[in-house]
């Protein structure tokens, strides 16, 4: 009897393994070779690292952000790393005309598009909500509406190529976190828009994948300078993070969780033990350090 149980257990294990891994495509860097990609917010941080990975894989890239001098340097490095071609377009994403213009320029340069990576975010404060409604509106324009506008503009090209939309979000776009009310608001909006749109694509048999990326704390200069005095948790490497985002997009995954355990487990707690999660998260914040920095 004991033997039979063990055999049954082993069988269930094998079946589960087959269920989870069967037919799952593995990532190959060649998947990105010759692909035409837009990366927004690529003058620094994770976006910059994504541009370098894509360059090494032999993609055509258009990058954008506001700071032209930085974009120029990133493009030069992309060319050295092996990009099939690399261009930059400077401008601000609080201008919806500009957001659409970036897509139009990519069409002019490449004649089509395979992947749209939406990654930029506007400046916001890391502190208690200050009641500034105009700031929320402005941040929604940069972090959310420009994503919508670029998606609408790029959709005909992405339909033609069976391409990918990759949306960089955050744990703060899945769980409410203190000290980042405006930011969290804009990231939740992305989930609402893109998860709903994905369902419509399935129904309409539109072969464009949507990948929402849920990131934990990553070691970019901006993040470390903004939150390291308050958040007591090591930051994950931006290079690896950038690669995981590209992999998820190329494999047409619904969502990417990076770092996996720092984000995926939080989802479990969010749904099954929210009060416990809130308790844990608050313990992770050294709010007194925030008060000290302001003095
Ligand atoms: N780092 C983390 O801990 C972390 C955690 C979770 C999620 N994420 C997400 O990861 C993504 C990248 O973050 P990051 O840490 O790499 O930030 P980052 O280094 O500050 O990069 C932000 C990018 O957006 C650009 N940008 C800023 N304001 C803009 C505007 N008004 N119009 C157009 N572009 C603008 C910046 O360039 P310019 O200033 O030159 O315009 C820069 O290229 C974001 O979506 C963020 O929410 C990051
Ligand atoms: C918005 O972007 C468009 C396209 O790049 C540009 O022509 C226009 O001058 C920009 N508007 C502002 C207010 O910067
Ligand atoms: C969707 O597009 C991808 C990439 O072009 C392709 O590999 C896949 O076969 C397409 N699927 C369908 C159902 O057309």
Image: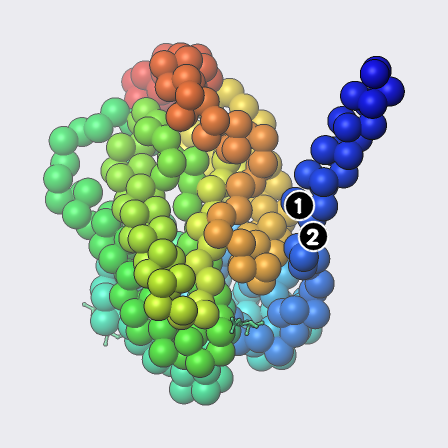
| The residue at label 1 has a CB less than 8 Å from ligand 3 | no
Q: Label 2 vs label 1: CA separation?
A: 6 Å
**Residue 101 in view here:** yes
For label 2, count other residues whose C-alpha is less than 10 Å away and answer few (under 14), some (14-19) or many (20+): few
Residue at image coords 35%, 68%: 204
Residues 285 and 187: in front is: 187
Whole-percent x, y for residue 103 in the image: 36, 75
Say if 233 sits above or below 106 in the image: above
Residue sitting at 51 percent across and 20 percent down? 232
Of 128 and 206, the residue lying toward us: 206
Residue 219 lies in quadrant: top right
Determine whether label 2 and label 1 are within 8 Å by CB.
yes
Give me the disc on residue 22.
2
Is residue 44 in view from this perspective? no
Residue 251 spot, x, y in % from top left: 59, 59
Q: Secondary structure at mark 2?
A: loop
Please give the label number shown on residue 144: none
Q: Is residue 122 above or below residue 294?
A: below
Q: Is residue 24 left or right of residue 46?
A: right
Q: Residue at x 45, y 22 (%)?
A: 269
Q: How busy is the neighbourhood of tag 1: few (under 14 within 10 Å), some, or many (20 plus)?
A: few
Instruction: Residue 223: give x, y in percent of width and height.
Output: 46, 38
Q: Give the labeled residue for mark 1.
A: 19
Q: Residue at x 71, y 63 (%)?
A: 28
Position of the N terminus by quadrant: top right
Q: Is residue 229 above or below residue 33?
A: above
């Amino acid at each position: 009897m004991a033997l039979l149980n063990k055999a049954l257990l082993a069988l269930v294990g094998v079946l589960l393994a087959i269920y989870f891994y069967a037919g799952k495509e593995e990532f190959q860097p060649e998947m990105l070779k010759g692909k035409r990609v837009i990366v927004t917010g690529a003058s620094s941080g994770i976006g910059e690292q994504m541009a370098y990975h894509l360059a090494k894989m032999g993609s055509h890239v258009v990058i954008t952000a506001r700071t032209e001098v930085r974009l120029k340097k990133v493009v030069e490095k992309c060319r050295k790393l092996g990009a099939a071609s690399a261009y930059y377009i400077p401008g601000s994403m609080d201008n919806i005309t500009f957001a659409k213009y970036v897509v139009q320029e990519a069409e002019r340069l490449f004649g089509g598009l395979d992947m749209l990576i939406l990654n930029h975010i506007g400046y916001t404060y890391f502190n208690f909500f200050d009641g500034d409604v105009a700031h929320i509106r402005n941040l929604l324009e940069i972090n959310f509406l420009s994503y919508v506008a670029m998606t609408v503009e790029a959709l005909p090209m992405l339909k033609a190529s069976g391409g990918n939309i990759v949306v960089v979000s955050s744990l703060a776009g899945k769980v409410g976190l203190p000290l980042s009310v405006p930011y969290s608001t804009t990231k939740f909006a992305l989930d609402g828009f893109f998860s709903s749109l994905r369902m419509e694509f399935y129904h309409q048999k539109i072969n464009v994948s949507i990948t929402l990326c849920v990131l934990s704390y990553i070691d970019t200069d901006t993040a470390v300078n903004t939150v390291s005095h308050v958040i007591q948790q090591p930051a994950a490497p931006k290079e690896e993070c950038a690669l995981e985002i590209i992999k998820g997009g190329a494999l047409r995954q619904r969502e990417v969780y990076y770092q996996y355990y720092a984000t995926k487990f939080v989802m479990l707690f969010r749904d099954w033990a929210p009060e416990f999660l809130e308790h844990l998260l608050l313990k992770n914040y050294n709010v007194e350090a925030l008060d000290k920095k302001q003095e």
